[in-house]
Image (cartoon, grey):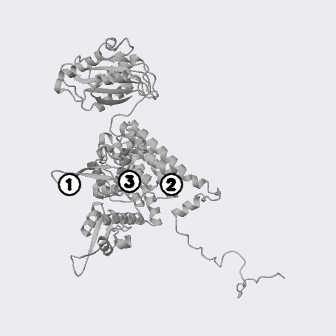
């Protein structure tokens, strides 16, 4: 059972609409099925002209509101739509009467033992345009004893009442009000998007961009920079007490304007419960240095992946900085360890630097440092000094094929480790896997951005959208951090190094999609054990989309022998996919050994010169 609550000012106007023909002439049999007193006495009378007379019913409903006078609510009309699921049976008027009585009792607005509750009626006028059985509960927010009703958290109480009614009447089970679902666009937003020719409401577009920037960024400044690069308008909220402190943010689209002429702004909390700035800061702490995760240092990343990640972070920090102190500060904010090299002649002069990730060591346990020159020729300290004195060139960090292949492998291994951790915790301690399930959303969102394009890329985007609800803890709580979650977030940041559309559908990319599908399936099992039906369904839907994406990505391998039509490019074959994964050519084979089986030349003889063209004798 689904509930939709609205507020209004004119109870008579609402009654006119409910008893009218409706927007699509779907109101075929409007009548009352329940109310605060005897229903036949409340039913609007039919006038001689065949129309209903709502003056008596509207007057009765408005009487307690009028008695409150100036203490009455600005919007005293409370309107709730109760809808059965399409798969449910068609309920009778008597069943809807019992459901409405139970619903108002559980809401606390009109309890059975309270004769002074609010006045209310329930209207049933047939199936909706989509064939859904439903009723409308209309109440005025004024008690009959002259007090105002308690309405705090009425949305949550309505959800709890619907869940109880579903159990009592054997109706299809719906999701609880655990606030794990993202905020849906309003009807006005959807209709405005359709009028402007948009494929989706701005709220959805902005949420996707914010999630991508939060997953790829390592700190607050990088988050805002990525949003601005993507063409998103950002408005920061500054503290009144501390002008240098950012307490929140809002985002908007450049072409989404309000009537006043300015952009329509959406705060992080209006997009999703876990996208407020304080919760984003907690997320970056979870994926930052090893001491934030509270477990063990970073492991599992190859040297090529570490070098690519350090190069990307250094490029980003250099672009956002104007001098050396700002550059080194941004590196440290991103969780990068920095070691400066000082001059022997002038101990206060910095002549170079090297960076590494926490816990990145060699086989002997020694920390592996990378100088700026080892990352890229443009990242040496003298080159950066010249860059800061020149206009920005907007260059991105390059990634060579070997590093690209290493990134795919490392991210797939991180997804496998995360799935294993969830599998081990699901039965004994499900709460220990909450952070890993939350971090999986970052990996999915980043993979969808990197592999965007093509049918498989579109399915990845759908999988990320489907999984979104399965990731969050109920009521917006932040889970306890764990190493597997921090490891998976670092893997998502590593994958973001490839950039949007920067990943070809190679064998290693297909392997990552398969690993992500297994991870989503483990999260679905975890949510089933926790009895979170809606989240489990979301994770299963994401796993199905990922498996389909992997299947479609493998199709070019199956058609390797197919011949391209004239004027068309040849289909991607297994050999081509392998070539993209292993771009370096194999070494030339060694010359045959003299001990290889075969006829040996006689002693002292040499190879004969090639025979001159001509007829044989």
Image check: 4 left or right of 606? left
Callout 3 environment at 10 Å: few (<14), some (14 to 19), or many (20+)?
Answer: many
Provide the secondary structure element on which disc 2 rests. helix
Image check: 584 left or right of 382? right
Could you tell me how far apart the alpha carbons at marks 3 and 2 are, in whole angstroms? 18 Å
**Discs 3/2, front:** 2
Identified at 36% across, 40% down, the residue is 189
Mark 1 lies on residue: 245
> Is residue 403 placed above or below 111 in the rendered structure?
below
- Image location of residue 611, percent across then percent down: 75, 83
Provide the secondary structure element on which disc 3 rests. helix
Mark 3 lies on residue: 488
N-terminal of the pair, mark 1 or mark 2, is 1
**Discs 3/1, front:** 1
Of 57 and 47, the residue lying toward us: 47
Mark 2 lies on residue: 510
Q: Residue furthest bottom?
A: 604
Callout 2 environment at 10 Å: few (<14), some (14 to 19), or many (20+)?
Answer: many
């Amino acid at each position: 059972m689904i509930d939709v609550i609205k507020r209004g000012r004119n109870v008579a106007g609402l009654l006119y609409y409910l008893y009218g023909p409706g927007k699509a002439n779907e109101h075929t049999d409007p009548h009352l099925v329940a109310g605060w007193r005897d229903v036949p006495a409340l039913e609007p009378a039919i006038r001689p002209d065949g129309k209903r007379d709502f003056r008596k019913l509207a007057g009765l409903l408005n009487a307690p509101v009028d008695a409150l006078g100036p203490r009455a609510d600005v919007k005293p009309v409370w309107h709730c739509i109760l809808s059965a699921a399409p798969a449910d049976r068609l309920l009778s008027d008597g069943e809807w009467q019992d459901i409405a009585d139970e619903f108002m009792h559980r809401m606390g607005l009109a309890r059975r033992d309270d004769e002074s509750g609010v006045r209310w009626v329930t209207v049933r006028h047939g199936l909706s345009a989509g064939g859904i059985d439903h009723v409308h509960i209309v109440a005025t927010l004024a008690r009959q004893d002259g007090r105002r009703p308690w309405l705090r958290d009425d949305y949550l109480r309505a959800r709890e009442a619907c869940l109880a009614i579903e159990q009592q009447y054997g109706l299809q089970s719906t999701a609880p009000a655990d606030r794990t679902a993202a905020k849906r666009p309003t009807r006005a937003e959807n209709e405005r998007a359709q009028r402007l020719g948009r494929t989706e409401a701005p709220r959805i577009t902005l949420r996707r961009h914010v999630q991508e920037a939060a997953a790829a960024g390592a700190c607050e400044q990088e988050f805002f920079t990525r949003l601005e690069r993507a063409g998103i308008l950002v408005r920061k909220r500054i503290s009144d007490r501390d002008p240098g402190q950012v307490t929140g943010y809002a985002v908007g689209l450049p072409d989404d304007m309000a009537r006043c002429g300015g952009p329509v702004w959406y705060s992080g909390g209006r997009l999703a419960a876990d996208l407020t700035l304080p919760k984003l800061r907690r997320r970056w702490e979870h994926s930052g240095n090893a001491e934030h995760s509270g477990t063990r240092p970073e492991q599992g990343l190859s040297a090529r992946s570490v070098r690519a990640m350090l190069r990307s972070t250094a490029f980003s920090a250099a672009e956002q900085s104007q001098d050396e102190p700002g550059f080194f500060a941004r590196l440290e904010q991103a969780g990068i360890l920095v070691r400066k090299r000082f001059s022997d002649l002038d101990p206060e002069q910095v002549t170079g630097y090297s960076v590494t990730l926490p816990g990145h060591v060699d086989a002997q346990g020694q920390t592996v440092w990378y100088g700026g020159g080892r990352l890229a020729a443009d990242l040496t300290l003298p080159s950066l000094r010249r860059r800061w004195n020149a206009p920005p060139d907007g260059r991105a960090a390059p990634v060579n094929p070997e590093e690209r292949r290493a990134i795919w492998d490392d991210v797939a291994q991180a997804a496998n480790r995360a799935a294993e951790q969830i599998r081990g915790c699901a039965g004994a301690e499900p709460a220990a896997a909450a952070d890993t399930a939350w971090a999986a959303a970052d990996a999915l969102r980043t993979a969808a951005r990197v592999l965007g394009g093509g049918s498989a890329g579109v399915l990845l985007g759908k999988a990320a959208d489907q999984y979104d609800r399965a990731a969050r803890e109920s009521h917006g709580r932040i889970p306890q951090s764990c190493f597997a979650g921090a490891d998976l977030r670092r893997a998502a940041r590593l994958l973001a190094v490839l950039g949007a559309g920067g990943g070809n559908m190679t064998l290693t990319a297909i392997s990552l999609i398969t690993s992500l599908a297994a991870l989503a399936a483990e999260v679905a099992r975890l949510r089933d054990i926790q009895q979170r039906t809606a989240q489990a369904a979301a994770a299963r839907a994401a796993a199905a989309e990922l498996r389909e994406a992997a299947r479609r990505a493998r199709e070019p391998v199956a058609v390797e022998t197919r011949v391209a039509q004239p004027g068309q490019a040849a289909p991607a074959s297994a050999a081509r996919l392998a070539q993209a994964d292993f771009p370096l050519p194999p070494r030339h084979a060694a010359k045959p050994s003299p001990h290889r089986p075969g006829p040996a030349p006689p002693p002292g003889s040499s190879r004969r010169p090639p025979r001159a063209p001509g007829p044989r004798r």
